[in-house]
Every structure is written in C-alpha cells, then in structure tokens.
Amino acid sequence: MSGWPILSTITFLPLVGIFFLVLIRGDAATVARNSRQVALWISIVTFALSLVLIGEFDTANPGYQFVEKAPWLPEFGISYHLGVDGISLFFLVLTTFLTPICIIASWESIQNRVREYMIAFLAMQVLVVGVFCALDFVMFYIFFEGQLIPMFLIIGVWGGERRVYSAFKFFLYTLVGSVLFLLAILYMYLQVGTTDIPTITAHEFGREAQIWLWLALFASFAVKLPMWPFHTWLPDAHVEAPTAGSVILAGILLKMGGYGFIRFSLPMLPEASDYFTPLVFSLSVVAIIYTSLVALMQEDMKKLIAYSSVAHMGIVTIGIFTFTQQGIEGGIFQMLSHGIVSAALFLCVGVVYDRVHTRQIAAYGGLVHRMPVYAAVFMVFTLASVGLPGTGGFVGEFLTVVGAFAVNSWVATTALIGIILGAAYMLWLYRRVIFGELTKENLKSITDLNWREVGVFVPLIGLALFMGLYPKPILDVLHASVVHLMTQTQLARVVSPAALELAGQVPMLAAKQ
C-alpha cells in the first residue's frame, strides 16, 4: 500500500473513462449505449478501489493516512498533497458510491447528448473526490470551485424548463461566496508562507485575524451547505436538475460546506469559531423551523425534499458547533446518512416523474394499489428521513441532540421541534402520494419498479438500515479523528461566554459556583 498512490488512482481514474468516452465512434444509439457502459464500469471500479481504503484504514490513527506528497510549485510553497483521515474517508466513499447509482438512474431518462452527460458526471466525481483528499489549499480550491462547472452544465443542459435560470443562480451564489474564501487563502499563505493545510492548521492566527478569516470562510461554506438565508438557490436547482443531478447535489455537494467547517473553521480558527457559535446556532434554529414550515406548504415533491435538506443541514451545523464529541460525530454521521436518504428520496421522485412527467403532489394518490414495491421503498426512506430508530437518520440526530443538550438546552429543544416538523411534512407527502383511492386515470396503468430500479434502491436501503442498526464501524473510524479535532480546537466541551449569555445561562452557572 505504501508504494501505491491509491488516492491519486481513485481521484483521477474517471479521467481514463472520459478519455475512452471521447474516443467512442458510431451512430447515436451506439455512442449512447457504449457511453453508459464505459461510465458505469469506470465508476464501479473506482468505488471498489475506495473500499480498499476502508479495509486498510487504521482506526487508531487520528492523522492523515495514504498520504501522497510531491513538489508542484515549490518556489511558492505549493505541493501536490493528498491524504484522508477518519472524517474525510467516508465522504470520499459516499461520492464513489453515489456516482454509479446516478449513472444507472440516468440509464433511460437521459436520451440526448448521453456521452456529454456521462463526461460531466465523471468529471464531477474527479473534482468532488479531490475536495475530500486535498491537503493543499490551492489544490482544494481548484477542486472546490471546479465542481461548479459540471454541475452547472448538468442543470443547464439536461434540466427542466427553467434550467438556464437555475444553473446561473446556482453558479453565481456559490461563486460569490468562494471569492471571499480565495481571499482568506491568500491571507493565510502570506502569513504562513505555504498553502499546506496541516501546516496552516498548526499556525496560530491572532484573534482579530481569525474573526475576519472565519467570516470569509463562512461566506463560502454557508452558501454551499446551504444555511439560512443563503439557501434560496437550492430549491430552484433541485427542481430543474435531472434526477441524478439532484441526487449528487443533495447527496454530496451540500456536504462540502459542512466538511469545510470541520476541516478549516474549527481547527484553524478556534477562537473565532467559539465567538461566532451563537450566530451559527441562531441561523441553524431559524433554518430548522422556517424551512420545515415552508416544506409543509410545498406542492412540488422535489421542492419539499429540497427544503427538508436545509432543515437537516441546520441540525448538522448545530452538532458541529457544540464542540462536543457527540455533537461533532452526530453532525458528521447525519451528513453521511442524509447523503444516502436524500439521494434515495430524489430517486423515488424520479421514478414516478419518468412515468407521469409531473412532480406535483396533487397529481398523485393511491399509488400503493399499482406500485406496492415502490410504496415499500418510499416508506423506508420516508421513515429514515424522519429519524425512525433503526435507520441512520436516528443515530445522527440522536448524537447531535445529546451534544446540543450538553451545551444549550434551548437549541437542543429547537432541534427536536424540527425533527417533529420533519415527520409532519414527510408523512404528509407520503400519505398524499401513496395512500387514498386510485382515482386519476393516468395512474391506473402505471407500472411498478423494474429490475434496474430495484437494483438501484437495494444497496441504498441496505446502507440506511446498516447505519441505523450497527453504526459502530463508522463511529469507530470517526472517533480518533474527532478527538484529534477537538484537541486542535482546544474547545472540547467548552462553551463560549457569549453562547452562555445568549442562552441566559450565565446567572445559573454563577449561582452553582
């Protein structure tokens, strides 16, 4: 393993697939068929290689593993530097897992420019995997911003009627926030003399510098996550994106914002993170309550699930900024679980959309009479989304709430209210679509899941249940890196005076003392 650059192989292997896709010749049908097969096999091989990382990963080692480092621009302190720890490992595997799922889900629904579509998805995988492997800020920024291009094309070329508007809105929102991120990188480079992420993490910035740097990073990560009120691009992007585009957007791209908070904001800028914790809690609370209420009013299935993603990410940010082991591990686990469940929910919407060509909730009803297998699959992911015990959603939410209660009981209570509201809008959606009388004529001939669709959902169901019934392997991998992160921040189980004052708990603590 020490002599094999496995991270470089996993990151750039899809480029080999892109090379073969460009070489494909023949009529339109031949090119489309071969493009699907090449993209699928390349993505499966990449996923298989990522499983090797799990098998060889040392759970007791909190540092970066499988490290690859070589000079790139040594005169500027810039290097080719890759590595993963317990936090980034599962995000990498989630990316390589969802890519073949997206390709299979697009097998029949995408009929135009199939080769270009598959090239966009393989390019997306290269850039997203690079985000979770990069240990140099220049590399990270290139990957972090580069993924905007294939996602912009996926929405703008293969999306719905308002695809161009939604693609530009997505691109501009995320690009503006990332400009400030670039300025922060330049400042840190001038201060430290290198763009090496571990080196910059070990550097102690002054309090005032931390505050400005934290705000610059926050502008980028809050949009990417997205946090309220920077979330308005997300519903439009989800509604207009093709099904697989929504899957990769909700399953992977949103997680890069939370990953940025964990990888950079907390360990590099601990004082600023502590100072701004009340702000993060406030925005998270508003996101959970407000977007849950908005989701209850939606008439479009995709928009409802999109707003639910904002609410779930609010729970994630609460967990991350509790600075407790349970909260941070819960936030990471919630992101991983949401990556599986939200991807599956968008695939469920895509199944009926391919048959009826509408996402309006009112257009459905009584599907259980014609699609019992689909109804069972949809039920599993609906219950996983609301955090039913035995599913991955419950583990992440439980750990997050436990960590939040240790810091601020009001914030934890709000998170619980959001979970209740989540059950309300998801069960409302399920009842309207699945139950009731089958009265609409166009639904009386609708067909149930075919074998290809069943093959897509089976591994997603297995993962959702495995994460809920036996989360220990994942938590074991996370534990050492999370403890190391808490050591870096020097804020383990410590709450800032500002956060306590916000919650009105300072007098209570003083009285106890």
Image (spheres, rainbow, N blue to C red):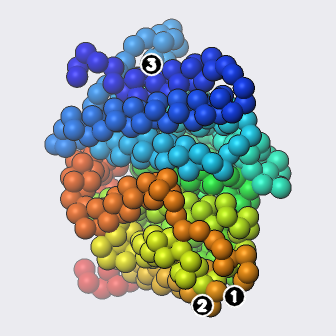
Position in image of residue 1 (x %, y %): 22, 22
Observer-nearest residue: 237 or 356? 356
Which quarter of the rendered picture does the C terminus lie within? Answer: bottom left
The disc placed on residue 436 is 2
On the picture, is 366 further left or further right than 460? right
Nearer the viewer's eye, disc 3 or disc 2?
2
Q: Is residue 8 visible?
A: yes
Residue highlighted by disc 1: 439
Residue 379 tag number:
none
- Disc 1 packing (10 Å; few <14; some 14–19; many ≥20): few
The residue under label 1 is which amino acid type? Thr
Q: Which residue is mark 3?
A: 80
Amino acid on which the number 3 mark rests in the picture: Tyr
From the top left corner, tell me how far across and down residue 82 is, in percent: 39, 26
Q: Tell me whether circle 1 and circle 2 mark residues in contact (CB < 8 Å).
A: yes
Q: Is residue 381 above or below residue 33?
A: below
Can you say whether 432 is above or below 316 in the image?
below
Q: Nearer the viewer, mark 1 or mark 2?
A: 1
- Hey, which residue is sitting farthest top in the picture? 75
**How busy is the neighbourhood of tag 2: few (under 14 within 10 Å), some, or many (20 plus)?**
some
